[in-house]
């Protein structure tokens, strides 16, 4: 066992790529021990080796599909384990569907709902009680700017996690457990490639790098904020979205979804 500076452990879902990998990198650099969760075991192992070498921290891996009951149960079991308790939970794993709602099968929609809403809800449920008992904890839910505008079931799922994070932060914050929804716009990750969506028409100024999103998201979480919208340009768009008529809001998202 290594002697991580602050004796804290962060569990990150979707830690093999994109924003999750960056959360692992930045929390590792702050010398939190890590529990990395994703489906690809080889990729998890490679990340763990690298993070142990770079930061002299403990890194556990859990290979789990968070769209299955057994996958969620395996991660929930780690969150309720009293030894080396998890002090930071980052609900990050997720993806979007390329086709509009009516063209997807109901199973595809149910699977997306599972990864974006059901799994984070169940993992928060597992994490929050031990955190409240210790009077300390931090939960970060990676949402999206899409949660502020009408954008199909993806946007609706992200709206759910933003709303629930706000409620949870108000209720649990005074008891030492802070909950923050991080709401990025477009970020350079594997997200769009995995969903098979073209990014050709998205202007360059709308893209952010994961390091900035995670740095600003972590700063907001440490400050106990309910919502973080990384970058000033997206914070302005989020404010503007409150005044947009539904039709315009929907057009600002991807029209097909
Ligand atoms: N990139 C953007 O523009 C953007 C914008 C706003 C919000 N977001 C949100 O940011 C979060 C992270 O996305 P990203 O952009 O970093 O995407 P990414 O680069 O594609 O990474 C997704 C991660 O989630 C894991 N994952 C996917 N399905 C899983 C499952 N069923 N069970 C367990 N792990 C699973 C993947 O690992 P395995 O394949 O190994 O399981 C991978 O580590 C998502 O919630 C997304 O909605 C992204």
Image (spheres, rainbow, N blue to C red):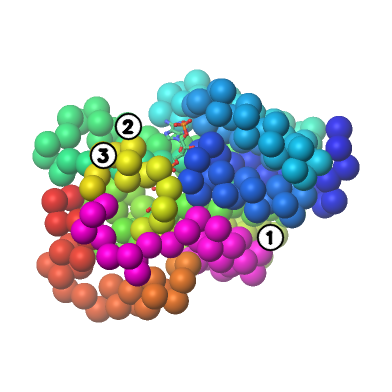
Residue 36 percent across, percent down from the top left: 61, 35
Q: Which of the labelled discs sits on residue 196, or is there none?
A: 3
Q: Tell whether 32 sits left or right of 227.
A: right
**Does residue 88 appear anywhere in the picture?**
no
Query: Magenta includes 255?
Result: no
**Circle 1 residue:** 175
Comparing 81 with 132, the one in front is: 81
Element type where label 2 sits in the image: helix
Q: CA distance from mark 2 to mark 3?
A: 17 Å
User: Of discs 2 and 3, which sits in the foreground?
Assistant: 3
> Can you tell me which quadrant of the image ligand 1 is in?
top left
Eye-nearest disc, 2 or 1: 2
**Location of residue 167 with respect to 128 vertically, above or below:** below
The residue positioned 41% from the left and 53% from the top of the image is 188
Q: Quadrant of the N terminus?
A: top right
Tell me the crowding category of disc 1: few under 14, some 14 to 19, or many 20 or more residues within 10 angstroms, Cα based: some
Q: Which of the two labelled residues, at mark 2 and mark 3, occupies the earlier sequence position?
A: 2
Q: Which residue is mark 2?
A: 111
Please tell me whether mark 1 or mark 3 is closer to you in this view.
Answer: 3
Q: In this view, which residue lies farthest toward the top?
A: 70
């Amino acid at each position: 066992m290594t002697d991580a500076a602050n004796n804290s452990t962060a569990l990150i879902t979707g830690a093999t790529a994109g924003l999750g990998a960056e959360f692992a990198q930045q929390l590792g650099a702050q010398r939190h021990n890590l529990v990395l969760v994703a489906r690809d075991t080889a990729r998890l192992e490679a990340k763990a080796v690298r993070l142990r070498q770079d930061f002299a921290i403990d890194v556990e891996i859990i290979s789990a599909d968070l769209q299955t009951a057994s996958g969620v149960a395996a991660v929930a079991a780690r969150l309720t384990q009293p030894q080396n308790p998890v002090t930071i939970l980052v609900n990050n794993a997720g993806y979007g569907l390329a086709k509009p709602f009516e063209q997807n099968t109901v199973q595809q929609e149910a699977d997306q709902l599972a990864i974006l809403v059901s799994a984070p809800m169940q993992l928060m449920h597992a994490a929050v009680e031990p955190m409240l008992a210790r009077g300390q904890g931090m939960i970060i839910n990676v949402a999206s700017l899409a949660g502020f505008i009408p954008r199909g079931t993806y946007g609706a799922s992200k709206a759910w996690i933003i709303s629930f994070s706000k409620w949870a932060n108000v209720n649990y914050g005074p008891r030492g457990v802070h909950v923050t929804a991080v709401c990025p716009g477009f970020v350079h990750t594997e997200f769009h490639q995995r969903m098979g969506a073209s990014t050709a028409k998205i202007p360059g100024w709308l893209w952010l790098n994961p390091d900035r999103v995670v740095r600003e998201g972590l700063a907001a979480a440490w400050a106990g904020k309910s919502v973080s919208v990384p970058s000033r340009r997206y914070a302005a768009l989020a404010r503007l979205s409150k005044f947009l008529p539904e039709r315009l809001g929907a057009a600002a998202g991807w029209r097909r979804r």
